[in-house]
Amino acid sequence: MKLPRRLQNLFRQIYKRFSTPQSYARHLGVNIGIDNYIPDKDVWSSEPYLITVGSHCQITHGVKLFTHGGAHILRKEHPAFDIFGKIVIGNYVYIGNNCLIMPGVTIGNNVLVAAGSVVTKSIPDGVIVGGNPARII
């Protein structure tokens, strides 16, 4: 028996409110490791199954992960244009407040991303990045 949409939405809201951010992320389809600190539940994009987070990571308040862009606006003029990709976050990663992580980015292990950074390209292991666009500091 399929539940009515309003009842499904009510159950979804209750689960979101009373679950931990990590269990909610797993429920959405995020591949997430252990011992992570993620205070917000609204970090995940509309395609959370494309996101992988390692272990011992801290994703602070206001961080947004994007797995796709606004390519649908230009699709009539440029049919091959598409911005879509997985996001992979390694182990022992700290992502500061209000960072934006764009599609197709891989963040290596032992990385610190400074607050307010816009990460548009992949980041190697063991570095500190910051800025818009994020660069190695």
Image (cartoon, rainbow, N blue to C red):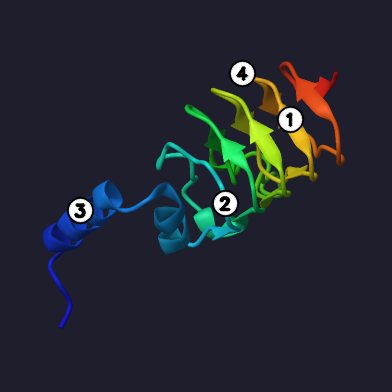
Residue 48 marker? none
- Residue occupied by mark 1: 112
Report the quarter where the C terminus lies.
top right
- Counting every numbered tag in the picture gives 4
Q: Residues within 10 Å of mark 3 (few under 14, many from 20)?
A: few
Image position, residue 132 (x, y; %) = 71, 17
Q: Quadrant of residue 41?
A: top left
Distance between mark 3 and mark 4 Cα atoms: 31 Å
Name the secondary structure under disc 1. Answer: strand
Label 3 is placed on what type of residue? Answer: Ile
Name the secondary structure under disc 2. Answer: loop
Asked if labels 4 and 3 touch by Cβ distance under 8 angstroms, the answer is: no
Distance between mark 4 and mark 1 Cα atoms: 12 Å
Distance between mark 2 and mark 4 Cα atoms: 24 Å
Asked if labels 2 and 1 touch by Cβ distance under 8 angstroms, the answer is: no
Name the secondary structure under disc 4. Answer: loop
Residue 14 marker? 3
Q: Residues within 10 Å of mark 1 (few under 14, many from 20)?
A: many
Mark 1 vs 2, N-terminal side: 2
Asked if labels 3 and 1 touch by Cβ distance under 8 angstroms, the answer is: no
Asked if labels 1 and 4 touch by Cβ distance under 8 angstroms, the answer is: no
Residue 35 marker? 2
- Residue occupied by mark 4: 116
Label 1 is placed on what type of residue? Answer: Leu
Distance between mark 1 and mark 2 Cα atoms: 17 Å
Q: Nearer the viewer, mark 1 or mark 2?
A: 2
Q: Is residue 92 visible?
A: yes
Q: Nearer the viewer, mark 2 or mark 4?
A: 2
Residue 1 appears left or right of 103: left
